[in-house]
Image: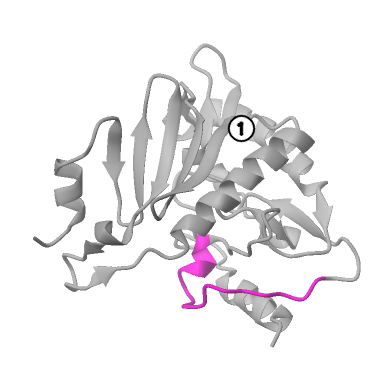
Amino acid sequence: MVTTTRLLNKNKEKDCISVTFDRKYYQTTTAFIKRSLRPQEWQVSTFHGRIIVPRLGEERLLNEAAALEFIAKNTTIPVPKVLACFEDDGAVYLITELIDARRMDDLTCSDRIIIEEELEGYAHQMHTLRSRNLGGCSGLVIPPYRVWDKTPRDEWKLHPSEVEEYVFCHHDLSQANVLICHDELKIKAVIDWEYSGFWPEKFERAFYKRVGPSVALEGEVDDVDEMLKFMNEKLVR
């Protein structure tokens, strides 16, 4: 039988709430779980009929786990608490506390402006964290997906700087990844840190200022070519 996203979602196991081409998601009364797919769960695309091999499925979860613990220790930015991160039978599990909240993109325009001010303060905290090395505090180099989607390269070994010039960036700071308290206009958690790491500050884009994904939309400046050029110049050959 051909494995497809629709088939896996139709036959979800207990507590599984969704299956995508590279991930399974679970939710219990107290925890939220991301799990990378095992090879037997890789899916056939309904568009081109070929198997979709998830890119860096395990590495992105390991990077997120390290980032969540790093941010919790070094800033006041609210993030989900990491309960566990481990490998089992060819899959990586990231288990965090469940955050009961609404998303920033569910707010009115006037309420979003208030949240933007709070978020800018948190972004400033992130950018005070500095390093000589490019990439995640996990030691993994995972570019933001707007760049990653434009290159087939998965392994990036990059030269460090002589000084701590790189700042910590979230790199997927869209309104969908900012969770808001139900009973007050306050950020409850910033989520989805898979692509985070130390980079030049100019590459941290304020995607939270409008609704939509963490990529340049029509009429916005697209920095993908500039970032790819920077990374290739830093590449250890």
User: Looking at the picture, does residue 178 appear above or below residue 169?
Assistant: above
Residue 165 percent location from the top left of the image: 85, 62
Query: Considering the image in quadrants, where does the C terminus appear?
Result: bottom right
Residue name at image x 19 percent, y 48 percent: 8
Q: Please, what is the three-letter code of the amino acid marked with disc 1?
A: Val
Q: Is residue 125 left or right of residue 119?
A: right
Q: Is residue 234 visible?
A: yes
* Image mark count: 1
Residue name at image x 53 percent, y 41 percent: 85
Q: Main secondary structure of the magenta part?
A: loop
User: Looking at the picture, does residue 88 appear above or below residue 72?
Assistant: below
Residue name at image x 56 percent, y 51 percent: 62
User: Looking at the picture, does residue 95 appear above or below residue 46?
Assistant: above
Q: Is residue 32 left or right of residue 48?
A: right
Query: Considering the image in quadrants, where does the N terminus appear?
Result: bottom left
Q: Which residues are magenta?
A: 145-160
Residue name at image x 69 percent, y 32 percent: 77
Which residue is under mark 1?
A: 79
Q: Give yes or no for residue 153 being in the magenta stretch.
A: yes
